[in-house]
Image (spheres, rainbow, N blue to C red):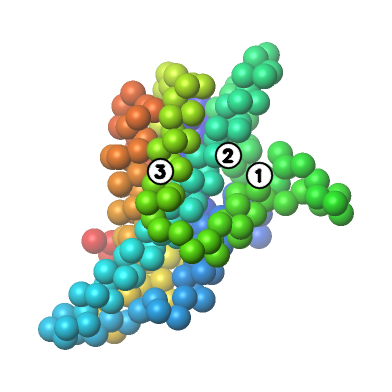
Amino acid sequence: GLCLNWGFYFKATVDCFELGSKDIDEALRCLDDQRHFHDVLPSKETPTFGPYLAFNRQYTYHLFSHARLGRLLFFKNFLQSILENPSVDDCQRHWLWAQLQPQKVAKPDENGICQDPLREFMETVLPWPVPNDFFNKAIYQTLGDIFSLWTPDTPFYIVLDEANVITHGTYCFLRAFEGNPILNEILSTMGRFIDKDMQQIVVDEPVCLVAGSWGKIS
């Protein structure tokens, strides 16, 4: 479907087929490394429950704001390249291919190796000690740039593949026997992205598709 329509293709983990960017992988790695992230929260009756849950959600939003900005900048650069080469056909298919094999569209480094630019972006910005407002403003500005380059003529889709990886294990938090998959928080972040951001550049509300998930997602 993404060969015929515009959309973003995210992958929770990159498997042996090496399709998709490792930007979400990089965000999840930071989640694992974050000492203050609470994968098991205390009882709801304790005074620390609310602050711990709020921190988890804020930090998850922070991480995936990086991924959103990186994808938008990548999309903006793609649209600019299309304008410079107006003879290119099947733009949606080329855009999907760029997301499936982002290293193939990158310039080689000094060693002649092409890196995944989306993952490199995450590695660069994740250590920055800046507030969410910084990324929110950057996202808003980038969306404005995209709007000046592009008029959508098809529905827009946001796909999250291999989502089963973030429905269990270390990617859950709440209480010991009452898990809250990190997928819930990612979908919440994507919902805000659709409602507040993407509405600026698309005609119809984008559709979010989750693939590979199982289990109960509230």
| Amino acid on which disc 2 is placed | Phe
The label on residue 102 is: 1
Kindly state the secondary structure of the residue where label 1 is placed. Answer: helix
Classed neighbour count for the residue bearing mark 2: other residues with Cα under 10 Å, few (<14), some (14–19), many (≥20): some
- Asked if residue 70 is positioned above or below residue 165 in the image, the reply reads above
The label on residue 74 is: 2
Alpha carbons under labels 3 and 1: distance apart: 25 Å
Q: Is residue 93 left or right of residue 34?
A: right
Q: In this view, does 22 lie to the left or right of 180?
A: right
- Is residue 169 visible in the rendered image? The answer is no
Q: Where is residue 58 in the image (x, y as percent from the top left)?
A: 33, 63
Classed neighbour count for the residue bearing mark 3: other residues with Cα under 10 Å, few (<14), some (14–19), many (≥20): few
Marked residue nearer the N-terminal end (2 or 1): 2
Q: Name the residue under label 3.
A: 137
Marked residue nearer the N-terminal end (2 or 3): 2
| Amino acid on which disc 3 is placed | Lys
Q: Where is residue 11 in the image (x, y as percent from the top left)?
A: 52, 53
Alpha carbons under labels 2 and 3: distance apart: 17 Å
Query: Which mark is in front, 2 or 1?
Result: 2
- The answer to whether the residue labelled 2 contacts the one labelled 3, judged by CB atoms less than 8 Å apart, is no
